[in-house]
Image (cartoon, grey):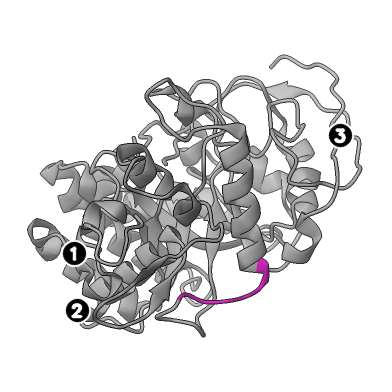
Amino acid sequence: MEHHQLAIFFLGLLFPAIVTSVGINYGQIANNLPTPEHVVPLVKQIGATRVKLYDADPKVLKAFANTGVEFIVGLGNEYLSKMTNQANALAWVKQNVQCYLPATKIVSIAVGNEVLTFNDTSLSGCLLPAMQSVHTALVNLKLDNKITVTTAHSVAILQNSYPPSSGTFRPDLKNCISPILDFLSKTCSPFLINAYPFFAYKANPKQVPIEFVLFQPNAGIVDPVSKLHYDNMLFAQIDAVYAALSTLGYSKLPVQISETGWPSKGDDDEVGASTENAKKYNGNLLKIVSQKKGTPARPNNDLNIFVFAMFNENLKPGPTSERNYGLFKPDGTPVYGLGFSGVSVSSGNSTSSGNGNGNGNGNGNGPSVYLSPPANSSSGYLAISSSTVSFCS
């Protein structure tokens, strides 16, 4: 591991009001990030009380011991087949979860990421059995009342998303989704969805008003069925998910936005990817979260949102945008001025642990494409650290 000294300076104003509400995705597909010990003060500075990992990196889990920060740990897609075996699942939970408790507050295990939209039947067929095995392991260890088991989905699992009240799941995925929803309901676990209005805007920049996706003042849309007014795309996407869940009989299932964000840089054909738009999207999103307001269809439901992502990650594959979703640069300085109070720390950098992470408005009656990204909008990262299956030390 290479070490160097760096100063992390924060410029200050916005985040303090968000202390109890926001979560952050902490991916590490990079070779130039601060060590986890130096990420702890960064998480505290942005007011995040929840962190979502894409593996169960022991260095991160140890660094955040006794901080009170809640963790969702991840179990990568490539491990799903192994986790259908109960003995393997029990060993994984013991080695990657149990031994960090109670010092590190692990509250959930996300089994796989966007599995159902990879169109890989062998992979999707392993998803629920793996979730069940992990849950059984928690039961056997008497941890099931403290830790939930779930999985994150892309918005591309929706067949219809406009109007939001008519949201439905893709028919070809129903046989996979329904048993998963039943499992989540019986185990009191949340439904996780990755929602990126950026993809809808990028696909239709001439039809989708930028103000609608960036939470800026705009005329919005009115759902012709529910008559509810929407002034931003993310809320429309969330309510479309609620509607789809209700159609299958799971209206009370809690929904968490496990990923949402906006890139600060992109390729020439990635319309809208800019520092200015990323600042507006994340800044306005965090203001809304701090207001503790729900969506039009669920005004009394808390917005459980995890911003994507903590850092720009230089080794992520795909278009330029994939490496530029971070709130922070690798040296710990903000990518744009969302406002962080003054702290200076010195840190060594760490090499990539290889853990994976993933990642419309209309005038009244716009098409569903305004609310749904392309099926392959999030590249969904499969790589995961070997540390995920390591023993505590």
Asked if residue 21 is positioned above or below residue 326 in the image, the reply reads below
Can residue 35 be seen here? The reply is yes
Residue 294: percent from the left, percent from the top? Answer: 52, 77
Residue 290: percent from the left, percent from the top? Answer: 68, 68
Do the residues under discs 2 and 1 have CB atoms within 8 angstroms?
yes
Residue occupying the point 54% across, 41% down: 391
Is residue 172 part of the magenta span, yes or no? Answer: no
Kindly identify which residue carries mark 3: 9
Residue type at mark 3?
Phe
Asked if residue 169 is positioned above or below residue 313 in the image, the reply reads below
Region of the chain picked out in magenta, as a range: 290-295
Residue type at mark 2?
Thr
Label 3 or label 2, whichever comes before in sequence order? 3
Can residue 393 be seen here? The reply is no
In the drawing, does residue 280 fall left or right of residue 12? left
Q: Secondary structure at mark 3?
A: loop
Seen from the viewer's position, the closer of residues 355 and 279 is 279
Residue type at mark 1?
Phe
Residue occupying the point 46% across, 56% down: 212
Identify the mark at residue 247; answer none if there is no mark. Answer: 2
Which quadrant of the figure has residue 381? top left
Kindly identify which residue carries mark 1: 169
Residue occupying the point 41% across, 59% down: 233
Which quadrant of the figure has residue 330? top right
* Quadrant containing the C terminus in the rendered view: top right
Residue 187: percent from the left, percent from the top? Answer: 37, 77
